[in-house]
Structure formats: structure tokens, C-alpha cells
């Protein structure tokens, strides 16, 4: 392989081949040429006058997005010293500028490191250090927490800011005199395109490495065969680009198939409905809790443009599927994916949907359930395992061995596989809390609570919740001099929100005299889950 990257920092931190999963490239759609740049494939191949992106601020054609991204690429390479393979952090909500920056970084040969808008300075600093980020492009509205992160990090990156989708500000000024032509970096299909951070069960962020071919593979497998998109489709999603679910639904899939991305900065249920009405959305992606929350808001709404609804991020209950179908006439397409796998690998649409089941394996992938000995079962309950054109490559992380087993990606989910090839979710296999589609590591929340002087000991679990799937529940032993009260509950919740991303805060807090432990002093989480 002749890489197009000079900076090989991420490539050199990949797990050795024997520790990576088996990759499958079945069918011509998944056999890519050795050299291509995925940003070029997504934005420069469609007719220039076709509509690429629309939001409440305006609309942009494919030609305009191509030119915009070319200017950003030239700025980075010719004036900001970007070396191919350098990591570029992106920070901000889903806007046209964010999308243009994503393209520009890849065209310039950079590696995109997108961050969730809800992260705080401490969490961003960890990403800056872990990825050795050299450059950053940030929405000016996030300057405060980014400044805090730079103060904590070992090295602050060269930073360019922008003002949402406004035609002014730092970035707009810097590219004003730059011509819109640019020859994109000659990347290999196996050059690194993305470094996607996720939290594992220890709370330490894991960096998932995805190549240029992976960016296209999720479109040419799941989207092509299950969603069956067309060039006239308009796509909206509640997830930010930092979630590969959002990246696929909002950017990769629309542009791979000549559609239009509809971006939403603050996508609550009402905002999603507003976008569907205003911009005639045809394909919607969000979490089950959002579909449930939208149902009572549907009266008087014009959502006839919708033809495909996709759910991911957490298990879709059959009751939610039926309620949405009854209210709209649309069957929700369920799916399971993972940051490690780039996007969805089990799903079903149309007449293949069985409410309550996640679906069947997506064309291009194979999946099974493994017993405790690692043997693949024809049917029954076991650990979900998958192989395909994408797979887990953690950057410089010993946890690779816990995700990849005998060539399989083992996701940490327990599933039931039936005789018809349908996969039915049973439970998470580890201590990760999945709440409203967000993955929350219990130890990370515990760490935030321990920073408060009132907390002597604590333990966090996921508690069942009919609305969110799970909520974060904390059991706390108070330090001397503190007494249990509603005011202290509120204070602790506010403290966690100020320390880590707000969605991670404990919605339930129970004060206890002691935590259940083994004879050797290890915490017994199962006792807390079982109410012992």
C-alpha cells in the first residue's frame, strides 16, 4: 500500500492484522479502486446545480458545497500548514459550514475528529491529547469550552472559528480570496479518514479508526439495500456528525445517492417535526424515544413527505413501533450499528419488518450469536457477532482484544437469533448504560460524582425506564457532615452536568449507608440492579 498520508501517527497505532476482525468485501459495490478520496466521491460526482443541503439559514447546491470545501482544503494545506494525516478537530452543531469543513479536511488529506456538541472542556482536552490534534475548526458559540480544553491539553491546536452558517467571521474572512479549485489529496482506500471517539465501560474514550473505503461502505451496504434511497430524497437526523449514525444519515447517505441533507442545529421532537414540514423531509432518522415523543405532537402537522423512518441508538420497543405506525401509517425501520462498525449491520424494512425484532443481517455482512465458548449458533441466545466490509480498529488500545474474537466483531449485546434469521435484542452484555440512544459509561459518571465533596462512595447503574430505555441511577454514601436532601440531589446533578456532558447526569439518586461489595472489596453492581 502506498499511502497518501505523510503523518502516519494514527496508522502506526492500528492494531496488528492478527488482532483485527476478518473483513468481507462481497459484491462489486464494495470493491473499491485502490486510490480515491471519499469526500470527492460524495460531493464532486453529482450535477453541480442539484441541491445538496438545506436548512433554516439557506440552501446550497453540490457545486457550492464543492467550491466551499475546496477553499477550506486550500486554507488548511496552503496557509495553515496541514500535513496529510494530521488530525483536525471539528466542533459545532450540524450546519452547512460544519459539513463543508468535514469535506475540506478530507480533501486536504486530514483525518476528521468530530466532537459531540454536549462535551465539556475536560472531555475535549482528552480527545485533543489522545489524537494529538494539530488543527481545529470550531463554531464560535463553542469557544468557551474549547478554550478550557486547550488550557487543559498538552498542546493547543491551530484554531479557525466560524459563526454558524453566517457569511462572516474568521473562516469566511480567511477563505474569501481563495480560489475554489483544489486537487484533493491522493488517498489510498485504506488511508485513515475518521477518528470516531466513543466511551467504553471504563469511561476512557476509545478511538475507532475508519478508512476512506469505510465511509462509502456503510452507504453501499445498509443504505443501498435496506433504505433504497433515490436522488430526490431529503434526509434529516437528530444525531450530530460525531455519531456515525448521524454522519451516515445526514451526510454520507444523502450525498452518496444524490439527495439533499437537511440539517437541524437543536433537534428536539418539535424541531424535527418543524424540519419535516418546512423542508419536505422524506427520510428521517432518530431514536425510539424521539418517535414516541413526537406522536402527541402530530396533530395538525403536515408530514406527508415522509416515506422512510429509521430508528437506531437503542432497542425499538414493539409498542413504540405500533404507536407510530398507527399515528402515521409508516413502519419504522429498526437497526443496530456501532461506532466500531461505522454504521448499521442488522436491519429490516418494508414487508420484512417484524415489530420488536431488530431485523436481519444487512447485505455485505454476516452475523451470528456466540455461546460462552465462542461457538456460532444456528439459533438461540448468545453474544452478537458480526463480520463485513467494516469493523473494529481501536487506535492504540488494549481493548481491541475484548471486541474482536476469532475474526468476529463482538458488540457487547446479547441477542436471540430465530430460525428465520431475525435478530431480537435481549440486553447489553456489559455495564454500558444506553439512555435515549446515548451510550453512557457508569465509571465516568462515578468519577464526576467523586469530585464533589459530599460523596464518600458511589456506584452508578442503568435503571429500566419506559421512556428512555434506561436512566442513570446513582447510589451514594455521603461524607461526614452531609445529610440526604432534595437540595443535595439537585446540587449533585448540577455538578455532574457541569463536569461531563449533561445527558450523562444521574436522573435518580439514592443515598445509602454502604455499597454492596465482595469479600475482596469489589463492588457488586448486580446487587444494586437486583435491588438487594
Image: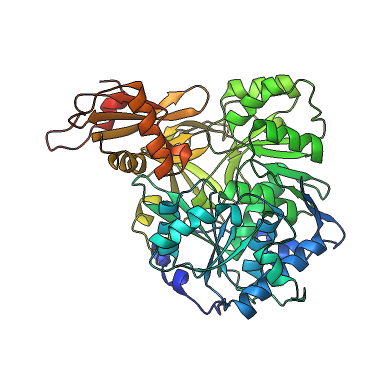
Q: Is residue 111 visible?
A: yes
Task: In this rendered view, identify the residue nearer to me: 20 or 172.
Answer: 172
Q: Residue furthest right?
A: 49
233 relative to 515, above or below: below
Image coords of residue 335 (percent x, y): 59, 38
Asked where in the image residue 326 lies, by quadrant, the reply is top right
Instruction: Say which residue appears at 68% left-offset and 20% top-offset.
Output: 296
* Rendering coords of residue 338 (x, y %): 51, 47
What is the quadrant of the C terminus in the image?
Answer: top left
| Res. 31 visible in picture | no
Where residue 397 appears, as percent x and y from the top left, is 36, 59
> Which residue is outermost to the left?
519
128 and 44: which is toward the camera: 128
**Colour scheme of the picture:** rainbow
> Would residue 182 be found to the left or right of residue 384 on screen?
right
Identify the residue at horizontal 29%, vertical 20% (top origin): 531
Q: Nearer the viewer, residue 365 or 100?
A: 100
Amino acid at each position: 500500500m502506498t499511502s497518501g498520508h505523510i503523518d502516519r501517527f494514527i496508522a502506526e497505532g492500528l492494531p496488528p492484522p492478527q488482532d483485527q476482525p476478518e473483513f468481507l468485501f462481497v459484491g462489486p459495490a464494495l470493491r473499491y479502486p485502490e486510490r480515491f478520496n471519499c469526500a470527492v466521491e460524495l460531493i464532486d460526482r453529482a450535477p453541480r446545480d442539484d441541491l445538496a443541503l438545506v436548512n433554516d439559514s439557506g440552501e446550497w447546491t453540490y457545486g457550492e458545497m464543492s467550491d466551499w470545501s475546496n477553499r477550506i482544503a486550500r486554507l488548511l494545506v496552503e496557509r495553515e500548514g496541514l500535513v496529510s494525516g494530521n488530525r483536525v478537530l471539528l466542533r459545532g452543531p450540524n450546519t452547512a459550514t460544519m459539513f463543508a469543513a468535514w469535506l475540506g479536511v478530507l480533501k486536504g488529506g486530514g483525518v476528521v475528529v468530530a466532537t459531540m456538541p454536549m462535551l465539556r472542556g475536560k472531555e475535549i482536552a482528552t480527545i485533543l491529547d489522545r489524537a494529538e490534534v494539530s488543527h481545529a475548526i470550531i463554531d464560535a458559540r463553542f469557544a468557551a469550552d474549547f478554550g478550557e480544553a486547550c488550557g487543559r491539553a498538552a498542546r493547543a491546536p491551530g484554531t479557525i472559528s466560524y459563526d454558524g452558517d453566517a457569511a462572516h467571521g474568521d473562516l469566511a474572512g480567511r477563505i474569501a480570496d481563495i480560489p475554489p479549485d483544489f486537487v484533493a489529496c491522493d488517498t489510498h482506500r485504506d488511508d485513515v479518514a475518521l477518528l470516531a471517539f466513543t466511551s467504553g465501560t471504563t469511561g476512557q474514550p476509545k478511538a475507532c479508526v475508519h478508512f476512506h473505503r469505510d465511509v462509502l461502505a456503510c452507504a453501499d451496504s445498509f443504505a443501498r439495500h435496506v433504505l433504497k434511497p433515490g436522488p430526490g430524497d431529503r434526509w434529516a437526523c437528530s444525531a450530530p456528525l460525531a455519531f456515525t449514525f448521524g454522519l451516515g444519515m445526514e451526510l454520507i447517505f444523502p450525498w452518496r445517492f444524490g439527495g439533499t441533507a437537511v440539517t437541524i442545529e437543536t433537534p428536539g421532537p418539535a424541531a424535527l417535526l418543524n424540519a419535516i414540514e418546512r423542508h419536505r423531509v422524506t427520510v428521517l432518522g432518530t431514536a425510539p424515544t424521539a418517535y414516541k415523543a413526537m406522536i402527541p405532537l402530530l396533530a395538525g402537522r403536515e408530514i406527508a413527505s415522509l416515506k422512510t423512518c429509521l430508528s437506531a441508538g437503542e432497542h425499538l420497543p414493539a409498542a413504540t413501533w405500533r404507536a407510530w405506525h398507527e399515528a402515521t401509517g409508516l413502519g419504522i425501520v429498526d437497526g443496530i450499528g456501532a461506532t466500531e462498525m461505522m454504521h448499521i449491520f442488522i436491519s429490516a424494512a418494508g414487508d420484512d419488518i417484524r415489530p420488536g425484532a431488530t431485523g436481519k443481517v444487512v447485505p455485505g455482512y454476516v452475523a451470528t450469536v456466540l455461546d460462552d465458548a465462542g461457538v456460532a449458533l444456528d439459533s438461540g441466545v448468545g453474544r452478537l457477532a458480526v463480520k463485513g466490509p467494516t469493523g473494529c480498529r481501536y487506535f492504540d488500545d488494549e481493548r481491541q482484544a475484548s471486541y474482536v474474537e476469532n475474526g468476529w466483531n463482538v458488540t457487547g449485546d446479547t441477542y436471540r437469533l430465530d430460525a428465520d434469521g431475525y435478530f431480537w435484542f435481549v440486553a447489553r452484555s456489559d455495564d454500558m448504560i444506553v439512555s435515549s440512544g446515548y451510550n453512557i459509561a457508569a465509571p465516568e459518571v462515578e468519577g464526576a460524582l467523586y469530585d464533589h465533596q459530599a460523596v464518600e462512595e458511589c456506584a452508578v447503574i442503568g435503571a429500566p425506564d419506559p421512556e428512555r430505555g434506561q436512566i442513570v441511577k446513582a447510589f451514594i454514601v455521603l461524607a461526614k457532615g452531609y445529610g440526604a436532601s432534595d437540595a443535595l440531589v439537585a446540587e449533585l446533578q448540577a455538578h455532574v452536568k457541569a463536569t461531563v456532558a449533561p445527558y450523562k447526569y444521574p436522573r435518580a439518586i439514592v443515598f445509602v449507608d454502604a455499597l454492596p461489595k465482595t469479600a475482596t472489596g469489589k463492588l457488586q453492581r448486580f446487587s444494586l440492579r437486583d435491588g438487594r
